[in-house]
């Protein structure tokens, strides 16, 4: 019955959405007041202090009429760093249509596929040639190592083939 009386009144029952809206509005107002207060403090800050260039993180050098410097803030200062794009990833503007969507690039796709199957380029081709020829005393030449690896692979393949052939012959003769 009390609820029916509340409905008939002008305010009606308490609406949780409007209560939350009112609470958020109050919070926004307090934050705006805090921003104004901090902004006024920031405006009162004297002229910039000079920092020694010989010692990058050294004490600030104050002028004769300035008050002594305040100790540095405990919180770190973060700077926004914009990463540089490598020059290989820069896209010319003709690869995008008027809506900003990248056009289909068949030659670029084929180039990427070709690059997937190529060996990576060496940073020092003379050193690679020197090592391949066996010019370093105490190291075997790469040709010899490749030959040993190839012979191991052939031997392993032949043993595996003979093993499978034996298993097949065993089952075909007994069944």
Image: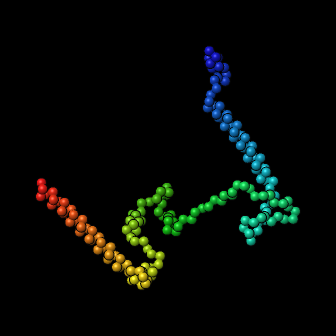
**Compared to 149, does 96 lie above or below?**
above
78 or 160: nearer the eye?
160
**Compared to 143, does 154 lie above or below?**
above
Tally of marks: 0
Task: Specify the quadrant that holds the N terminus.
Answer: top right
Report the side of 168 relative to 91 (left or right): left
Residue depicted at 80% across the width and 65% down the height: 61
Residue 66, how many percent across, how many down? 85, 61
Residue 136, how many percent across, how many down? 43, 83
Residue depicted at 74% across the width and 45% down the height: 34
Color scheme of the displayed model: rainbow
Answer with the quarter of the image where residue 62 lies.
Answer: bottom right
Answer with the quarter of the image where residue 104 lies.
Answer: bottom left
Residue 26, how many percent across, how many down? 70, 37
1 or 73: nearer the eye?
73
63 or 12: nearer the eye?
63
């Amino acid at each position: 019955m009390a609820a029916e009386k509340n409905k008939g009144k002008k305010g009606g029952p308490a609406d949780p959405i409007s209560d939350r809206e009112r609470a958020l509005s109050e919070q926004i107002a307090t934050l705006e007041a805090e921003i104004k207060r901090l902004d006024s403090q920031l405006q009162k800050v004297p002229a910039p202090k000079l920092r020694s260039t010989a010692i990058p993180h050294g004490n600030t050098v104050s002028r004769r009429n300035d008050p002594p410097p305040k100790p540095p803030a405990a919180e770190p200062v973060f700077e926004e760093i914009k990463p540089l794009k490598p020059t290989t990833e820069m896209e010319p503007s003709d690869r995008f249509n008027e809506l900003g969507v990248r056009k289909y690039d068949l030659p670029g796709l084929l180039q990427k596929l070709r690059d997937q199957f190529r060996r990576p380029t060496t940073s020092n081709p003379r050193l690679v040639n020197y090592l391949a020829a066996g010019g370093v005393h105490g190291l075997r030449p790469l040709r010899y190592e490749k030959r040993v690896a190839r012979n191991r692979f052939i031997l392993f393949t032949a043993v595996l083939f003979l093993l499978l052939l034996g298993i097949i012959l065993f089952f075909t003769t007994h069944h």
